[in-house]
Image (cartoon, helix red, strand yellow):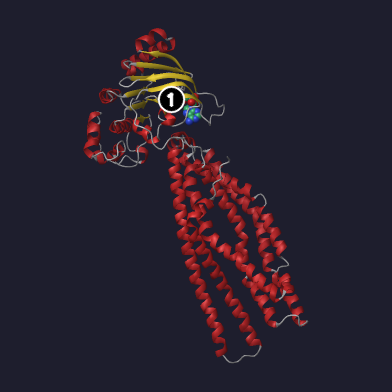
């Protein structure tokens, strides 16, 4: 069955009363705006008829003033109602986007440029405000009121109405010209905007490299090209539409050129009264503003659709299909059976893992080693549930990952990568993320157990030290130690450490490792390490090579049986002795 495409109206639905109210108020407001024009006609006619009693003008003028006040009030109330409904809708869309982030594979978020995601959640959602809060009520009114007046004018004098709208086909033609290729231009414009966002964020994140290599903004080609393209697109789009837009406005203003001579002709022939002539002249002026506003409706609708398409693309991204709940796991043995996997975004789409078979037992340490790019981190991320495998199966305690609820999986695994994220908050709060409701004492005990308490205490404000954006106020090693304390506080039955101590100095790494060995007793520990000496004592070492398990066993066995392992070990030991000699 074809899935129904998500549209902005799916979200508007729940707030439709607010929007309907604002449209009704806006309609009444635009109708009130027309009243002074009718009053104007009447007043001029009274003057033309020689009415000298000033009292006779009080009522029409009073009506005009009342209409102005009513118009102001109704427009204000309409805007208030539409904004209330709009901000509720924007809030719902943003919540839906954030909720969606929890359900898509983590890999999807990592693979989508940060700028594009930020643009969707912030800018594209903001972009809907103009359409929902202003254009829905105002444009409905600006279209409907001229239509009603058209019927009225047609009844008054169909000849004059035809003359008044003689130029309308030309205006429509201009609108068609303006809208030609608009969809495509709009999409390209937003793509250019995304490119700027991505480039700016990459530029800011990469500023260290840019400065270190003395690359100014101009030389940062991706950034300057994106900015240039964005400006060029905006300008060319505007240039293409501007001619048609000016033409349409000019033609709309030129109705007087037909109304005046033809009106005079009909009046002269006694076909219409002076009041009818004045009605047409004055309403031609009065209708100009709503009609020009209505002209922009198509442009704004297309823009809004382009903004919403980007939001819908995120909301409709494929999700990891997981049950809402699942029974607690009775064992935490991790088994990979014939697992094959490829990254969807990889250009050649080659299999990264090819039929991996591996069992990682509780109360045992499994180390994954192998050349760079062989697929070790990919295995760790698949176990942590970042993606679904393409073939084969990963199970924990005999339960396939696909049958485990996200919550159950999250509770079962503590995953620490070499660049685990720190929030711009205190050390205390960054560690506390490991376990909801953990007390300060729990946090300190975890740090003590990991041998990190002393170093945290020595920071400027101890546990209350702000770590800076992404932990930027701390050294790489300090950041890693905090993320390990956080993982240990979580006390999950499966612990995955992916190069988690790679930035830590040898002395502290040894302390950390002794602490970790104590803390993970009874747990399933999976370690990825390049420094082979740190995993030589592991119960099982899996040598990963080119996406396959080339050998598996203890250090002694691998050293004896695998030429690749022997080579890696000898090189590692060689480098270590060189380092020690230095
Ligand atoms: N998000 C991704 N999208 C596409 N390809 C990826 C992605 N992440 C990794 N790869 C590719 O998958 C392969 C395995 O990468 P992986 O990070 O698992 O290797 P690794 O053995 O952990 O390497 P290292 O020891 O250098 O960390 C590499 O060829 C890498 O380029």
Q: Determine whether the beta carbon of the residue marked 1 sits less than 8 angstroms from the nearest atom of ligand 1.
A: no
Q: In the displayed structure, does residue 84 sit left or right of residue 500?
A: right
Q: In the displayed structure, does residue 519 sit left or right of residue 69?
A: left
Q: In the displayed structure, does residue 241 sit left or right of residue 474?
A: right
At label 1, counting other C-alpha atoms closer than 10 Å, the crowd grade (few under 14, some 14-19, many 20 or more) is many
Q: Residue at x 46, y 23 (%)?
A: 375
Q: 467 and 94: which one is in front?
A: 94
From the top left corner, tell me how far across and down residue 336 is, in percent.
43, 22
Q: 140 and 239: which one is in front?
A: 140
From the top left corner, tell me how far across and down residue 70 is, in percent.
50, 74
Residue lying at the far top in this picture: please name it.
560
Q: Residue at x 62, y 82 (%)?
A: 42
From the top left corner, tell me how far across and down residue 161 is, in percent.
71, 72
Vertical side of 330 occupied by 88: above or below: below
Q: Which residue is mark 1?
A: 394
Q: Residue at x 56, y 69 (%)?
A: 30
Q: In the displayed structure, does residue 224 sit left or right of residue 465?
A: right
Q: Is residue 276 visible?
A: yes
Q: 195 and 7: which one is in front?
A: 7
- Quadrant assignment, res 468: top left
Q: Look at the image and tell me in which quarter the C terminus lies.
A: top left
Residue lying at the far bottom in this picture: please name it.
53
Q: Look at the image and tell me in which quarter the N terminus lies.
A: top right
């Amino acid at each position: 069955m074809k899935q129904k495409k998500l549209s902005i109206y799916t979200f508007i639905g729940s707030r439709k009363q607010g929007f309907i109210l604002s449209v009704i108020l806006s309609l009444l407001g635009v109708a009130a705006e027309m009243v002074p024009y009718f009053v104007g006609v009447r007043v001029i006619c009274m003057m033309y008829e020689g009415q000298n009693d000033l009292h006779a003008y009080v009522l029409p003028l009073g009506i005009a003033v009342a209409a102005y006040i009513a118009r102001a009030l109704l427009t204000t109330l309409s805007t208030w109602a539409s904004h209330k409904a709009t901000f509720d809708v924007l809030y719902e869309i943003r919540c839906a986007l954030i909720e969606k982030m929890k359900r898509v594979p983590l890999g999807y978020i990592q693979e989508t440029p940060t700028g594009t995601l930020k643009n969707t959640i912030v800018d594209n959602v903001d972009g809907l405000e103009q359409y929902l809060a202003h254009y829905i009520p105002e444009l409905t009114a600006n279209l409907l009121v001229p239509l009603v007046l058209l019927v009225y004018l047609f009844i008054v004098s169909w000849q004059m109405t035809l003359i008044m709208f003689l130029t309308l086909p030309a205006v429509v033609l201009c609108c068609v010209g303006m809208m030609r290729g608009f969809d495509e231009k709009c999409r390209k414009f937003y793509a250019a905007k995304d490119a700027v966002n991505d480039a700016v964020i990459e530029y800011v994140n990469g500023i260290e490299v840019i400065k270190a290599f003395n690359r100014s903004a101009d030389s940062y080609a991706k950034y300057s090209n994106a900015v240039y393209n964005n400006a060029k697109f905006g300008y060319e789009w505007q240039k293409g539409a501007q001619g048609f837009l000016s033409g349409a406005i000019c033609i709309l203003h030129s109705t007087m050129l037909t109304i005046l001579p033809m009106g005079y002709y009909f009046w002269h022939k006694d076909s219409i009264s002076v009041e009818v002539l004045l009605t047409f002249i004055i309403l031609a002026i009065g209708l100009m503003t709503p009609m020009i506003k209505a002209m922009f409706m198509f442009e704004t609708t297309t823009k809004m659709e382009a903004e919403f398409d980007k939001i819908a693309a995120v909301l409709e991204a494929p999700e990891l299909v997981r049950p809402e709940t699942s029974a607690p796991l009775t064992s935490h043995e991790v088994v990979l059976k014939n697992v094959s996997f490829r990254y969807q975004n990889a250009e050649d789409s080659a299999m990264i893992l090819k039929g991996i078979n591996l069992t990682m037992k509780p109360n045992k340490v499994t180390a994954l080693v192998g050349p760079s790019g062989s697929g070790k981190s990919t295995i760790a991320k698949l176990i942590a549930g970042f993606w679904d495998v393409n073939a084969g199966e990963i199970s924990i305690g005999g339960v396939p990952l696909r049958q485990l609820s996200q919550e159950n999986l999250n509770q079962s695994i503590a995953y620490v990568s070499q660049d685990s994220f720190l929030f711009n908050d205190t050390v205390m709060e960054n560690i506390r993320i490991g376990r909801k409701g953990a007390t300060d004492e729990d946090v300190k005990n975890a740090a003590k157990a990991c041998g990190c308490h002393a170093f945290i205490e020595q920071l400027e404000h101890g546990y209350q030290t702000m770590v800076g954006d992404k932990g930027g106020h701390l050294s790489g090693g300090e950041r890693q130690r905090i993320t390990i304390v956080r993982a240990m506080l979580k006390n999950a039955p499966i612990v995955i450490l992916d190069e988690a101590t790679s930035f830590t100095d040898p002395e502290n790494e040894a302390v950390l490792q002794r602490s970790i060995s104590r803390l993970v007793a009874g747990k399933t520990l999976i370690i990825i390490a390049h420094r082979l000496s740190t995993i030589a004592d592991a119960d099982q070492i899996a040598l990963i090579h080119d996406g396959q398990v080339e050998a598996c066993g203890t250090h002694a066995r691998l050293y004896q049986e695998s030429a690749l392992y022997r080579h890696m070990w000898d090189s590692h030991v060689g480098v270590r002795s060189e380092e020690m000699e230095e």
